[in-house]
Image (cartoon, rainbow, N blue to C red):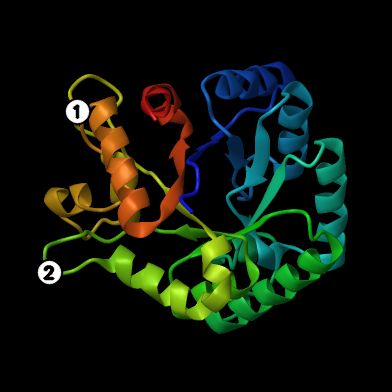
């Protein structure tokens, strides 16, 4: 059965209650299903932000994209998760990642484990949350084999990076999804696949601003960046066709955009 599309938008900043809540209501009106917040030091704290937005909306879900599991002890995180679940009326998705910014661990006065150790801790946190709050959907985002194996076996939603170009000779997105399918086994049909979009047109030119994408993929040429699944080009109708193609070809139905792209992407949502 084909899954319905779902659309998320990441909140980049803001601390004042009125501005945050007004923006959440605006996102709900534009057709977004969920607003995401990130988890980095010296920005905004995720759970107060999500609570403020949930209290101001009726349908909109809130979620993390993604929490750094290394910052949290499972029992304490479970307390935050279940409280927000209840306050929001169940409109909460928990996104988790293994953490990758060594400087943030240092700033938090925490040791920076190896990549394997960070994924092991993510597994520990995921299993605890799943046992304490089984009704909260868990998203795990990443690209490596070990992390995607964990996601395939434990998460409800898998965040795929979409950070490598698709060419006539190579399709890294298809390869990663095939890996997830093998690791998930019978669970695969129930998984929701997500891609975070990092560039799309915000005017009538049809050409995306690649500045954000270049921050993550500085080694790629412009042509290669334009060929990555995380970059969308064309008119709203053409982008809608692209996303239908992602659904038909890869089974990806959940797309997240950046806040600065919210107004432009709302036209795509309307097309779909």
Residue 99 in which image quadrant: bottom right
Q: In this view, does 169 lie above or below 245?
A: below
| Residue 75 x, y percent position in the rendering | 87, 65
Disc 2 residue crowd, few under 14, some 14–19, many 20+, Cα 10 Å: few
Q: In this view, does 97 lie above or below 19?
A: below
**Which circle marks residue 169 in the picture?**
2
Disc 1 residue crowd, few under 14, some 14–19, many 20+, Cα 10 Å: some
Residue 257 in which image quadrant: top left
Q: Is label 2 or label 1 in front?
A: 2
Q: Is mark 1 on a helix, strand or loop?
A: loop
Q: What element carries label 2?
A: loop
Q: Can residue 244 be seen in this view?
A: yes
Count of residue discs:
2
Q: Split into 4 quadrants, where in the image is the C terminus?
A: top left
Give me the C-alpha separation between circle 2 and circle 1: 26 Å
**Which circle marks residue 206 in the picture?**
1
Q: Is residue 162 visible?
A: no
| Residue 267 x, y percent position in the rendering | 37, 22
Residue ID at (27%, 37%): 241
| Residue 269 x, y percent position in the rendering | 42, 28
1 and 160: which one is in front?
1
167 and 104: which one is in front?
167
Residue ID at (61%, 82%): 117
139 vs 194, left or right, is: right
Residue ID at (60%, 23%): 28
Q: In this view, does 245 lie above or below 140?
A: above
Q: Is residue 87 above or below residue 155?
A: above
251 vs 54, left or right, is: left
């Amino acid at each position: 059965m084909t899954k319905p599309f779902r659309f998320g938008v990441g909140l980049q900043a803001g601390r004042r209650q009125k501005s945050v809540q007004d923006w959440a209501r605006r996102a709900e009106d534009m057709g977004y299903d969920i607003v995401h917040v990130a988890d980095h030091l010296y920005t905004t704290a995720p759970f107060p932000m999500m609570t403020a937005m949930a209290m101001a909306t009726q349908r909109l879900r809130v979620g993390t994209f993604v929490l750094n599991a290394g910052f949290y002890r499972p029992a304490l995180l479970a307390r935050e998760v279940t409280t927000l679940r209840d306050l929001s009326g169940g409109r909460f998705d928990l996104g988790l990642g293994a953490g990758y910014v060594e400087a943030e661990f240092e700033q938090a006065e925490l040791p920076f484990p190896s990549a394997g150790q960070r994924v092991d801790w993510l597994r520990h946190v995921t299993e605890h949350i799943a046992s304490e709050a089984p009704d909260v959907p868990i998203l795990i985002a990443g690209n490596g084999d070990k992390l995607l194996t964990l996601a395939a076996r434990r998460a409800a939603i898998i965040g795929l990076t979409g950070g490598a170009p698709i060419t006539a000779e190579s399709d890294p997105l298809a390869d990663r999804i095939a890996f997830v399918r093998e690791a998930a086994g019978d669970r695969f049909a129930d998984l929701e696949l997500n891609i975070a979009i990092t560039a799309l047109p915000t005017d009538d030119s049809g050409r995306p601003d690649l500045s954000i994408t270049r921050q993550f993929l500085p080694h790629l040429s412009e042509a290669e960046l334009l060929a990555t699944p995380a970059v969308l080009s064309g008119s709203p109708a053409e982008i809608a066709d692209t996303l239908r193609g992602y659904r038909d070809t890869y089974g990806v139905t959940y797309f997240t955009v950046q806040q600065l792209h919210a107004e432009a992407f709302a036209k795509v949502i309307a097309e779909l």
